[in-house]
Image (cartoon, helix red, strand yellow):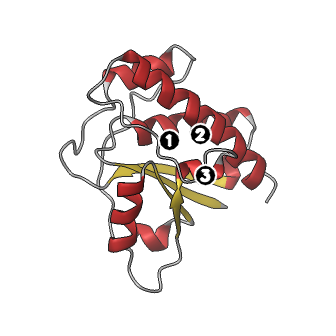
Amino acid sequence: MHRVLFVCLGNICRSPTAHGVFRQAVIDADLQDRFEIESAGTGDWHLGKAPDPRAQAQAAARGIDISDLRARAVFPEDFDDYDHILAMDAQNLADLKAMQPVGSRAKVSLFLDHLSGHEGESVPDPYYGGEEGFQTVYALVEATTESLLKQWGKA
């Protein structure tokens, strides 16, 4: 069982997109019994809110419904409850590492470190931009999801 937590700043754009795309890919591959998937934010401004309508629209255009997801903050216990905590950008990675309890089991890494050729890169935050930013996020998430499933789907 792989327990995966996707994390961005407010948990309304990038991490719920990753959550929804990864969830759908796991369903499509019939691997539901091998994954537990969640998303969260390092900030608490949007607690309980649905994903940004633009993120929902990008997912819906590809047949993925993320409207059921609700923003939540990262909790200290997440570092023991999840195997993999994937940060969408360098600042979220730094924040996660700063809040990670000593001795916790989660492997905290940058999301794009799992996509060949994009190691060390951040998924750009589309919140203050237009539709093209959400399209970019979706493309990066989709490619990284494929890479993660190849890596983890066999284990």
Is residue 121 or residue 138 the one in the foreground?
Answer: 121
Locate residue 53, reporting x and y percent.
Answer: 32, 21
Q: Which mark is residue 22?
A: 2
Is residue 131 or residue 38 the one in the foreground?
Answer: 131
Locate residue 44, reporting x and y percent.
Answer: 21, 51
Q: Residue at x 54, y 50 (%)?
A: 111
- Whichever of labels 1 and 3 marks the residue nearer the N terminus, that label is 1
Give yes or no for contact between labels 1 and 2 (Cβ–Cβ under 8 Å): yes
Q: Amino acid at mark 3?
A: Glu
| Occupied quadrant, residue 131 | top left
Q: From the image, which quarter does the C terminus lie in?
A: bottom right
Q: Secondary structure at mark 1?
A: helix
Q: Amino acid at mark 1?
A: His
Q: Secondary structure at mark 2?
A: helix
Most distant residue in the left direction: 45
Rendered position, 80 above or below 155? below
How many numbered tags mark residues here? 3
In whole angstroms, how far apart are the C-alphas of marks 1 and 3? 20 Å
Rendered position, 152 above or below 100? above
Q: Residue at x 45, y 48 (%)?
A: 88
Instruction: List the residue tagged with mark 3.
Output: 119
Left or right: 109, with 32 as reference point: left
Left or right: 141, with 132 as reference point: right
Q: Residue at x 50, y 26 (%)?
A: 136
- Decide: few, some or many residues near mark 3? Use Cα within 10 Å; few <14, some 14-19, many ≥20: few
Locate residue 64, reporting x and y percent.
Answer: 54, 23
Give yes or no for contact between labels 2 and 3 (Cβ–Cβ under 8 Å): no
Q: Which mark is residue 19?
A: 1
Q: Amino acid at mark 2?
A: Phe
Q: Secondary structure at mark 3?
A: loop
Q: In this view of the protein, can residue 26 be seen by the observer?
A: no
| Occupied quadrant, residue 118 | top right
